Image (tube, rainbow, N blue to C red):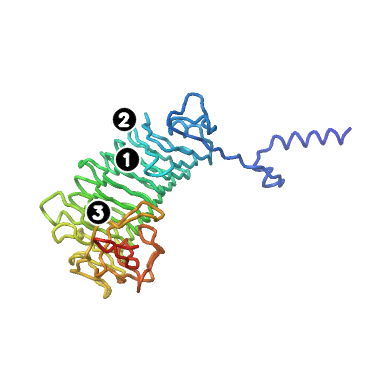
Amino acid sequence: MFKKAFALFVVFVLAALPVWWLTTVVGTAVAAPQATIRYVAPGGTNGTNDCANQNNPCGSVAHAALQTDAGDTVLVASGRYTETDTIRVFRDMTIRGEGLDKTIIGVETDPDIHQVFQVYGNLNATISHLTMHNAERSGVQNLGNLTLAHVSIQNNRGIIGGGGINNTSNAVITVTDSIISNNGIGVDTAAGMMNFGTARLERVLFAGNKASSYGGGLHNQGTLWLENVTFTLNEAQGGTAVSNGGDGVITMTNVTIARNVRTLSNPPDASAVSNYGVSITAVNTLIADNGPNQQCGGDIALTSLGHNLDGHNGCNFNQPTDLTFTDPLLGAFAQVTGTPNWVSTLMFFPSSPALDAGSAVHCPATDARGVTRPKGNGCDIGAYEFDNYRIYLPITVKG
């Protein structure tokens, strides 16, 4: 009788203990909750729909995100989606479209809808293979740990800064194989991206972003790594491509900064790269054809690790392997057909001094398009790696 009563007591006590104690102390294996795939497609229904049936998808990404449990994936089919509110990512999840040219997500034109996506703090999220556009402030505001891959962030207004991306203090963001374009309305700072946290960008194109003050492409006051990134046709009064301030630290490897536009007639206020922060360090980086003879400016000179190219002589590229007063002989955008992503970059011609002039030690494995580096006799300067010559009329391009 005593043994039976004792056994019942033990069962009662174990049942009352938390799962973590049973797993850690007793050694009982407790299965993790099974992740669920949620489906969104044009013409889907919301209401009480939990979006878990592929044959009965939801019609709104914001609604699907609300249905998720931690670790779920939201698959968004090809189509155009106009959300009636910001899509709030408030737990660990993945949101994946079918391609940045196929899954296009925007929000209604409404001053009270500030972002397309808002990622909350203390979580890990991934958003990929889609386009986000038409937000009043930012395509995405990140307060957590966010990965963006194969996305296009375009035509967001960014009235208070960070039109494409706003990465806040203590937030971490990684952006790869993506395009940030045509953000800002000329009355903001950091039209393409604002970074106060930690950011790493690889194989990214900033094009056509416009700020009325500084940071046409981006403004940084956190820690930022740029690799195989191209800035072109961005516009601002200063730092037309990149501005750095406060505690900002930027490391640039194989970056191309060219053909960015000033909005003022005073060249000193129209540098492509403006540094008032802690430091900007550059290697294998090309800065040329930006405004009238004004490539770099600010109170703090750039730090060169060598193998950089300056179209004039204002970027403090002072190492023996640096090239100054040098025309890189840039051409049009390189073709991307058949490459693993949609990111193009400004190409150069076979006679360019940037050819094979980069550092092998700092050479990334690919260029901005995913083309293997190095080709020929060494790594090329900038985000573009010249391939074996193949002749296509009327110009010579990479194969």
Figure quadrant of the C terminus: bottom left
Q: Identify the disc placed on residue 396.
A: none
Figure quadrant of the N terminus: top right
Q: Residue at x 43, y 46 (%)?
A: 146
Please state if 96 lies on the left or on the right of 84 as rendered: right
Give above or below for 231 relative to 38: below
Q: CA distance from mark 2 to mark 3?
A: 31 Å
Residue pushed farthest left? Answer: 265
Q: CA distance from mark 3 to mark 1?
A: 20 Å
Q: Nearer the viewer, residue 154 or 20?
A: 154
User: In the rendering, at what x and y percent does residue 234 appear?
Assistant: 23, 50
Q: Identify the disc placed on residue 112.
A: 2
Pointer 1: what residue?
138
Q: Identify the disc placed on residue 232.
A: 3
Residue pushed farthest front? Answer: 393
User: In the rendering, at what x and y percent does residue 64 appear?
Assistant: 47, 33
Q: Nearer the viewer, residue 245 or 182?
A: 182
Kindly indicate whether the residue at mark 3 contacts the one at mark 2 (C-beta within 8 angstroms).
no
Q: Amino acid at mark 3?
A: Thr
Q: Residue at x 34, y 37 (%)?
A: 115
